[in-house]
Image (cartoon, grey):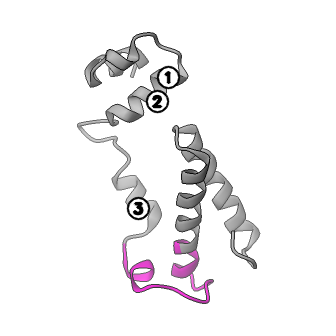
Amino acid sequence: MPAGSSKKRERQYEHIKAGLKKRGRSEDTAEEIAARTVNKERARAGEAKQKSKTSTDDISSSRRGGLRSHSGPQGRTKDQLYNEAKQKNIKGRSKMNKAQLEKAVGR
């Protein structure tokens, strides 16, 4: 986190990072996404010294995440299902298609 970040932004960063790691993202990727998200929120709230036009004019990070949460008619991606199957130690997951993975993980 950048120097001078508030405790709230530190908690937000850790929360986002933990959620991404839980969903199967690598440590480095989770840190990068969390930092970008928090920096964008800081820019939108006027807490950052520098900010880009897209940071302030674009759709908010929380809204964008909700829109892209894979909860629609198609559900989660095959990669997300595969990672969950891997966490649950389901045998034969590498040969399963998306429908089979959905059935195997039980959702």
Give percent across and percent down for residue 6: 74, 73
Which residue is identified by label 2? 83
Q: Residues within 10 Å of mark 3 (few under 14, many from 20)?
A: few
Secondary element at image label 1: helix
Q: Residues within 10 Å of mark 1 (few under 14, many from 20)?
A: some
User: Which percent across, then down, holds residue 40?
Assistant: 52, 73
The Cα–Cα distance between marks 1 and 2, rounded to whole angstroms, is 5 Å
Q: Amino acid at mark 2?
A: Asn
Instruction: In this rendered view, identify the residue nearer to me: 6 or 81.
Output: 81
Q: Quadrant of the N terminus?
A: bottom right
Circles 2 and 3 in contact, beta carbons < 8 Å = no
Q: Name the disc covering residue 60, or none.
A: none
Instruction: Report the amino acid beneath label 1.
Output: Lys
* Residue under the point 59% across and 65% down: 35
- SS assignment at label 2: helix
Label located before the other in sequence (3 or 1) = 3
Q: Judge whether residue 8 is colored magenta.
A: no
Question: What is the span of residues highlighted in magenta in the rendered image?
Answer: 40-58
Q: At 56% from the left edge and 88% from the top edge, which residue is drawn?
A: 50
Indicate whether 25 appears above or below 104.
Answer: below
Q: Nearer the viewer, residue 107 or 18?
A: 18
Dot 2, crowdedness within 10 Å: few (<14), some or many (≥20)?
some
Judged from this view, the residue extending furthest toward the bottom is 49
Proximity of marks 1 and 2: CB atoms separated by less than 8 Å = yes
Instruction: Estimate the spatial distance between the alpha carbons at disc 3 and disc 1, rounded to whole Å.
Output: 29 Å
Q: Which residue is mark 1?
A: 86
Instruction: Name the kind of residue labelled 3 in the image.
Output: Arg
Picture coordinates of residue 70, whole percent (x, y):
34, 43
Residue 63, numbered label: 3
